[in-house]
Amino acid sequence: MTPLKILMVASEMVPFAKTGGLADVVGTLAIYLKKLGHDVRVVIPKYGSIDFSRHRTRVLVEPMGVWMGDKEEWCTVIETHIQSDIPVYFVEHNGFFDRWGLYHDEEMNDYLDNPKRFGFLSRASLQICKDIRFSPDVVHAHDWQCALVPAYLKINDSDDPYLGNTASVLTIHNAAYQGHYHKINYDYLGLGLQNFTEDKFESYGHINLLKGGIHFADLVNTVSQGYADEIKSPYGGVGMAPYLSNKGDSFFGILNGVDYDVWSPGKDTFIPVNYSLKDMSGKKKCKQVLQSVLKLKESPRIPVIGIVGRLVDQKGYDLLAQVIRRIVDDMAVQFAILGSGELSLEQFFEALPKEYSGTIGSYIGFNNVLAHLIEAGSDFFLMPSIYEPCGLNQLYSLSYGTLPIVRATGGLNDTVINYDESTGTGTGFKFWDATTDALYYTIGWAISTYYDRYHHIETMIQSAMSQDYSWDKSSKEYVKAYHKAIGNKNDR
Ligand code: ADP
């Protein structure tokens, strides 16, 4: 197959800026596309928080003018590389991107000018192509932040010498985040009043960036087939169902992969001792260090349940908050909790270790090293999500032999095989109802299996660690999706 020229546009990417799984996906998919022989380049904002000390940078374009409505914005484009040969272009506009957070301030208030910030990023990404004379076969835009890329391509650049033949793919990592903002921002975006209609950008009098992106993209995907089915249904689709259904066979799921160079117990450079299926002794040491770091009672025999995630409604931690006292009162189990997000949940989980000293340990904040240690040192990993587009942590947990306990939704349902007590098989424990009872009894089921049928746990660990969710397969599916998008564009 001839190599493709691919421009990815995203609001976060490892190793530069990360708030969630999106960053892992963008950074790793780029590497795997390159391995397949494609010319892949990535555009992200130059946030003030990015540490460039380990990267050589150069100015690629300066100054670069970007037309937003009838206003020209000026910025600089900085270039660096990952893996030495994948260019990453940073759009430097300090007024927009040199701020405390990526999307919100310390109090979790969305920046009010987010549609302008990310509309600008989207338009700037296409301007870069013109300025450096790069003519991509496909642009791959991620989430609502970059949903305007497909729109600008069609609305403004359909006759452009560099972009006129470029197809677009939009990946939805979470359909609940749609970029829903006041229409006061619309003129700035320069999308034309004719597109402020119910089937494109208008939604109850406001702007919906994701909806417009879905309309204009040549192909739309999300990050698991289970979630693709959910968001085509009226309840799970949070308003997007009819627009996604309209895309026909140009909307489907491609499961995220795992970067096993980073997230596997044999190669992980953050954990105290590496281990593998052949020699699991390192896992015991990781558990001991985890217990010590989070001031849990150091005991190899008490099962530890790990949690890493954004403390937001979606993740189901409020269910856990309602029932965690009952769990630790009734069961001999420990919790190792890492997360940040909504203030009430942060305060709740931060206070618990004082009440349950030695049994519940928590760290409120973003801490990548601790995230790795929790994956390696825990016996179980809990994800009680209300919905989960793909979920990466359960995939990481499988790789570390840390059995996931999950609500059977979206990607969690697609990737975890439920324990079968009669055969001792499975890779984790699932529950369906989003209730405290279902959560309580499923944790009880996992913990009783740990104490009463540990040989089953051992079999499950073996099969969990043998699962293969590498990007090898998923990156090839993206390449197929790119070709389909190109075909769709040519058909039109
Ligand atoms: P989402 O993208 O919805 O946040 P995922 O499970 O797909 O959920 O990905 C979450 C990613 O973010 C994982 O790599 C996880 O380790 C990381 N992560 C989430 N919260 C934290 C935190 N507080 N500290 C460190 N890493 C975190």
Image (cartoon, rainbow, N blue to C red):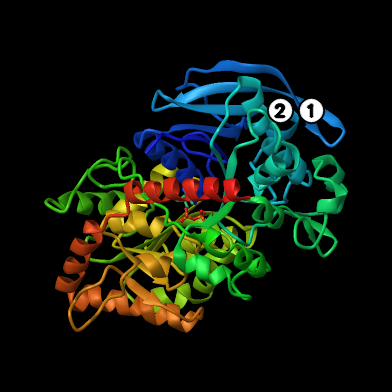
| Observer-nearest of 143 and 485 | 485
Identified at 44% across, 82% down, the residue is 438
State the residue at coordinates (84%, 47%): 186
* Mark 2 Cα-neighbour bin, 10 Å: few <14, some 14–19, many ≥20: many
Q: Which label was assigned to residue 73? A: 1
Whole-angstrom CA distance, mark 1 to mark 2, is 9 Å
Whether residue 103 appears in this view of the structure is no
Classify mark 1 as within 8 Å of ligand 1 or not, answering yes or no. no
- Name the residue tied to disc 2: 93
The amino acid marked with disc number 2 is His
Where residue 141 appears, as percent x and y from the top left, is: 58, 44
Q: Are marks 1 and 2 in contact (CB under 8 Å)?
A: yes
For the question of whether residue 170 can be seen, the reply is yes
> In front: mark 1 or mark 2?
1
Of 113 and 75, which appears nearest the observer? 75
Seen in the picture, residue 268 relative to 71 is either above or below; the reply is: below
Q: As displayed, is residue 266 above or below residue 317?
A: above
Secondary structure category for the residue under label 2:
loop
Amino acid type shown at disc 1: Glu
The quadrant of the picture occupied by the N terminus is: top left
- Badge 1: how crowded within 10 Å, few (<14), some, or many (20+)? some
> Is residue 152 or residue 256 the one in the foreground?
152
> Where is residue 187, by image quadrant?
top right
Q: Position of residue 474 (x, y in %)?
A: 38, 51
Task: Name the spot of residue 222 as percent of width and height, x first.
Answer: 52, 58
Residue found 65% across the figure and 35% down from its top: 164
